[in-house]
Amino acid sequence: MSAAQVRFARRLIDAGVDVVHGHSSHHPRPIEVYRGKLILYGCGDFLDDYEGIRGYEELRDDLVLMYFPTLDRATGRLVELRMTPLQIFEMQLRRASRDDARWIQETLDRISAQLGTRVTIDDDLTLAARWRR
């Protein structure tokens, strides 16, 4: 992720946007909570037709997330962010395995930590964002 992308996303928040929702990254991208507002630098395609394309397996484009943010109505500030990991298989979505959910949690935690966000995993394999409030 470039410094220009971070500056752009933060400028949107500074201008009054409550949520910045990046898309089409095809792999996990960082999560940031900036001034209490949610920035998702890339959410992927959710369901795509890239299955079987070789050469990028390490990016795990078969793993996707359903994002469930809870925002404060009055301020637009993020209250909670929960995520459900899924796997694309034969053009369908299914719950990710424990190992796959752990992989995406560890990846998101590592790449989001530099922006002050941590990602944890619960017993039910739901992910949660943690940040300084």
Image: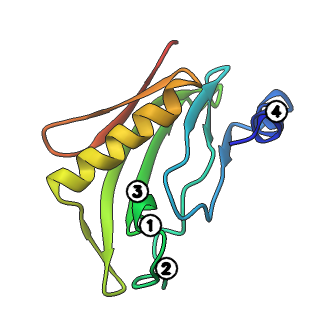
Whole-percent x and y of residue 27? Answer: 50, 58
Residue at the spot of label 3: 65
Whole-percent x and y of residue 53? Answer: 46, 83
Check contact, mark 2 vs mark 3: CB within 8 A: no
Front in this rendered view, residue 132 or 27: 27
User: Whole-Å distance between the Cαs marked 4 and 1?
Assistant: 26 Å
Three-letter amino acid code at disc 4?
A: Arg
Residue at the spot of label 4: 7
User: Whole-Å distance between the Cαs marked 1 and 3?
Assistant: 11 Å
User: Whole-Å distance between the Cαs marked 2 and 4?
Assistant: 29 Å
Front in this rendered view, residue 97 or 95: 97
User: Whole-Å distance between the Cαs marked 2 and 3?
Assistant: 13 Å
Three-letter amino acid code at disc 1?
A: Asp
Residue at the spot of label 1: 61
Q: Earlier in the sequence, mark 2 or mark 4?
A: 4
Give the structural element (helix, strand or loop) at label 3: strand
Check contact, mark 3 vs mark 4: CB within 8 A: no
